[in-house]
Amino acid sequence: MDNNLEKLRKSAHLTQHKLGKQLGLSQQVISRIERDISTITLEHLLLLADFYQVSIDYLLDRTKAKRSWEEQQVISEVLEEHYELVRALEMLDERDTGLVWALIEKMLEDNKE
């Protein structure tokens, strides 16, 4: 499980501290869970699965599929609808991809206000 959690956190461009702050947990708790030092509680497991929008089985490394079959169908439909955007993002280098993510995060933050 530790690898999946760390990969998910890093792919979301979050530090342990930022993730903990968003979930109401300390950085130390996130670190212990990621390193499999302490047993994860059901409450934390559900919190992380909801936050990352993945299945509990994926977090527990019981499956390689992050989402259920129904969720995969929805993703497939959305990807089909936005195929050109996804292709354009794939052609960007790491720096530009980071800039696009920063812009999207800023826009989402502005929309919350």
Image (tube, grey):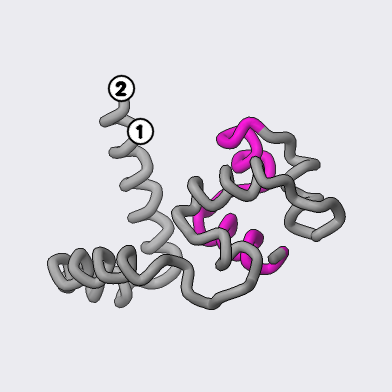
**Residue 54, x across and y down, in percent:** 48, 59
How would you rate the neighbour count of disc 1 (Cα within 10 Å): few for under 14, some for 14-19, many for 20 or more?
Answer: few
Classify residue 70 as left or right of residue 8.
left
- Asked whether 8 falls inside the magenta stretch, the response is yes
In-front residue for pair 89/8: 8
- The residue to which callout 2 is attached is 113
Three-letter amino acid code at the position of disc 2: Glu
Circle 2: element type = loop
Question: Is the Cβ of the residue at disc 1 closer than 8 Å to that at disc 2?
Answer: yes
| Helix, strand or loop: magenta stretch | helix
Residue 86 sits above or below residue 23 on the image: below
The C terminus, quarter of image:
top left
Residue at the far right in the pictured view:
37
In-front residue for pair 28/41: 41
The N terminus, quarter of image:
bottom right
Give the image quarter of residue 20: top right
- The residue to which callout 1 is attached is 109
State the residue at coordinates (45%, 54%). 53
In the image, the segment drawn in magenta is: 2-24
- Asked whether 64 falls inside the magenta stretch, the response is no
Classify residue 66 as left or right of residue 27.
left
Residue 21 sits above or below residue 8 on the image: above
**Residue 24, x across and y down, in percent:** 63, 31
Residue 46 sits above or below residue 55 on the image: above
**Residue 55, x across and y down, in percent:** 50, 61
Give the image quarter of residue 105: top left
